[in-house]
Image: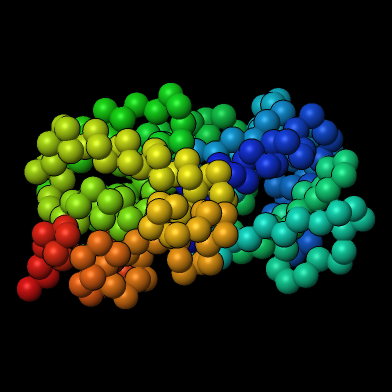
Amino acid sequence: MPEGHKTHFVAQQHRERFSGQAIKVSSPQGRFRTDARKVDGRELADVNAVGKHLFYDFGDEAPGRFVHVHLGRYGKFREHELPLPQPKGQVRMRFVGRDVGFDLTGPTACRVIDEREHERVCKRLGPDPLDPKADADLAFAKISKSKKELGALLLDQSVIAGTGNIFRAEILFELRLDPTRPGNSLTRSEFDKLWKTTVRLMKVGLKYDRIITVSRAEAGKPLSQLANDERFRVYKQPRCLSCGSEIVQWEQGGRQMFGCGICQGFSLD
Ligand SMILES: [Zn+2]
C-alpha cells in the first residue's frame, strides 16, 4: 500500500500539471459516474495530500468541492499524453487536463465530497509528518496514553497520518526501539526522536518517490541508483545490516512486521 510520501508526491505532481485548468472528469467503468458529473468541466484550484488521502479541490462548494481519493492497497494512477488511449481495465476515474491526463484504477475511495465531509475525514487523522504545520504533540498524546504496541500504533492513521507498513518497521529499527513496547512506555524524548526520524525518512521518500532508509554509505552507491530490494534496512531483509543476525518477521497490527531482535532488544517468545 502506498504510504504518505507517495500521496504527497502525487499531490505535488498533479498540482503542477492540472491546477488552474478546466478538467474533464469521467468514469469509464461507471462506478464514479454520478460524482464525476459534479466536477466535470470545472476548474481545479489545488491538490492536497493528508496522510494517505488525496483531495482535488475544485474551489466552489456546490455541487461538491473535493474529489477524495484513497488508493488503498490496489489503487494506481496511469498517466497519458493527450489524446488518451482507450481505457484499460476498470478505470474508476479519468482525469483530463490541457496537456496530460490520468486514469485511476482500483482505489479504496474515489468520491466527490463537500467541505464538511472533508473536515470529518481530516479530523479522524493524526498529524501528518510531511505537513510543516503538523502538531506532533497530538501524536504523543495518543501514543503515551495507549497500551498498544509501538509497531501497531505506527500503523494507526489516527495517531500519525501517512506512516504504513514499511515506514513503521524502518523507523523503529533506525531508533533501535523495541516494536513490542507499549506506547505508554515511550518517553517524551524518545517520541521526539521518533517524530524527527519519521519526518526525515518521509521527506527522503517524497524526494525519490519511493521509500529509502539506507544511507548512501550503507548502500555504497547514490540513492537514486538503488534497486528495489536494496532500499531498506529491515523490511523484507534476510539479515541485519548492523549486527548480521537474522531479521525476525511476525504479524503485528494485522500486517507483517520486520525487526532485529538483537539491535532492538526484543524477543518474541
Ligand atoms: Zn541487528
Where residue 52 appears, as percent x and y from the top left, is 49, 47
Image: 151 above or below 247: above
Relative side of 155 to 227, left or right: left
Viewer-proximal residue among 67 and 17: 17
Q: Quadrant of residue 246?
A: bottom left
Is residue 212 visible to us here?
Answer: yes
Relative side of 240 to 56, left or right: left
Is residue 142 visible to us here?
Answer: no
Q: Residue at x 35, y 65 (%)?
A: 235
Q: Residue at x 90, y 53 (%)?
A: 82
Viewer-proximal residue among 46 and 167: 167
Image: 123 above or below 60: below
Image: 239 above or below 31: below
Where residue 41 appears, as percent x and y from the top left, is 84, 38
Q: Residue at x 61, y 64 (%)?
A: 106
Q: Residue furthest right?
A: 83
Q: Quadrant of residue 253?
A: bottom left
Relative side of 181 to 99, left or right: left
Q: Quadrant of the C terminus?
A: bottom left
Q: Residue at x 28, y 51 (%)?
A: 174
Image: 64 above or below 242: above
Number of marks: 0
Where residue 47 appears, as percent x and y from the top left, is 64, 35
> Colour mode?
rainbow
Viewer-proximal residue among 63 and 40: 40
